[in-house]
């Protein structure tokens, strides 16, 4: 199993290929690969991403069957079932990297901001459960001064990712233990619909940067 930094590097390289239209995995998404995985899986990264149809994790990281354990939910929120899914993959498969990936133009974030600004409030209880998870991390932004609504949404997307990262890091005894004892890493990222680039914005441990990759992950 790759360690967290190796896994992060592999995701970054995959995203570079995706952006450059140079997929190396499209040819691997076939029946032979599928059959080889029937006996088991060893995903090297766990991705908690948004359900948005424009952000399929395997494609934007140029990965294929068996590579990523993907949890998708509108607004990439963290509720008990998401934590449980991360715990399952990290403990069952030994996966050492968790990426919470938000994206630009996220409808779940926009809907939350609209509601906080006095817009539509007639959502179903179920939809409300998503908005309620997003709200705490973005409502403090409303008192700030923003050049435009786009700027506010952009910052809200990132604030929501950071909140989900914090929740995963500190909302589970099992994950805390894996972080301390096995080097499990939980990082935030933002995918740009406009450029296809995934921007990882959590700090990578300095020792890993210097020791393994000479600052490539900075
Ligand atoms: Zn979204």
Image (cartoon, rainbow, N blue to C red):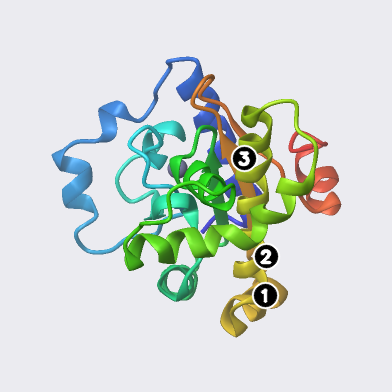
Quick one: 61 or 81, which is closer to the camera? Answer: 81
**Residue 46 in view in this figure:** no
Quick one: 32 or 148, which is closer to the camera? Answer: 148
The disc, 1 or 3, on the residue closer to the chain's N-terminal end is 3
User: For residue 102, which quarter of the picture?
Assistant: top right
- Of circles 2 and 3, the one toward us is 2
Q: Looking at the picture, does residue 176 appear above or below residue 203?
A: below
Q: Which residue is mark 1?
A: 170
Q: Residue at x 37, y 32 (%)?
A: 54
User: For residue 107, which quarter of the picture?
Assistant: top left
Q: Looking at the picture, does residue 198 appear above or below residue 81?
A: above
Q: Looking at the picture, does residue 67 appear above or below residue 1?
A: above
Q: Residue at x 19, y 59 (%)?
A: 38
Q: CA distance from mark 2 to mark 1?
A: 6 Å
Quick one: 4 or 56, which is closer to the camera? Answer: 56
Dot 2 falls on a residue whose secondary structure is helix
Query: Residue 185 appears at what percent x and percent y?
Result: 65, 60
Q: Which residue is mark 2?
A: 166
**Residue 156 in view in this figure:** yes
Q: CA distance from mark 1 to mark 3?
A: 25 Å
Number of marks present in the image shown: 3
Q: Residue at x 40, y 73 (%)?
A: 81
Dot 3 falls on a residue whose secondary structure is helix
Query: Residue 76 appears at what percent x and percent y?
Result: 48, 53
Label 1: how many Cα within 10 Å (few below 14, some 14–19, many 20+): few
Q: Which residue is mark 3?
A: 9
Label 2: how many Cα within 10 Å (few below 14, some 14–19, many 20+): some
């Amino acid at each position: 199993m790759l360690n967290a930094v190796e896994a992060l590097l592999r995701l970054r390289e995959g995203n570079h290929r995706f952006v450059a239209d140079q997929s190396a995995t499209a040819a691997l998404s076939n029946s032979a690969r599928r059959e080889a995985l029937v006996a088991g899986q060893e995903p090297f990264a766990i991705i908690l991403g948004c359900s948005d149809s424009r952000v399929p994790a395997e494609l934007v990281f140029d990965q294929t069957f068996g590579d990523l354990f993907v949890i998708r939910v509108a607004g990439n929120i963290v509720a008990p079932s998401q934590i449980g899914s991360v715990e399952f993959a990290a403990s069952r498969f030994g996966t050492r990297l968790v990426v919470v990936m938000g994206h630009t133009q996220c409808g779940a974030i926009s809907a939350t901001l609209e509601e906080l600004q006095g817009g539509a409030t007639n959502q179903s209880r179920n939809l409300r459960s998503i908005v309620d998870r997003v709200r705490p991390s973005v409502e403090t932004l409303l008192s700030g001064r923003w050049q435009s609504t786009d700027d506010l949404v952009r910052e809200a997307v990132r604030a929501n990712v950071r909140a989900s990262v914090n929740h995963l890091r500190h909302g589970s005894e099992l994950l805390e233990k894996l972080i301390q004892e096995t080097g499990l890493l939980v990082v935030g990222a933002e995918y740009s619909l406009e450029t296809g680039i995934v921007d990882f914005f959590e700090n990578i441990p300095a020792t890993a940067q210097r020791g393994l990759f000479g600052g490539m992950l900075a």
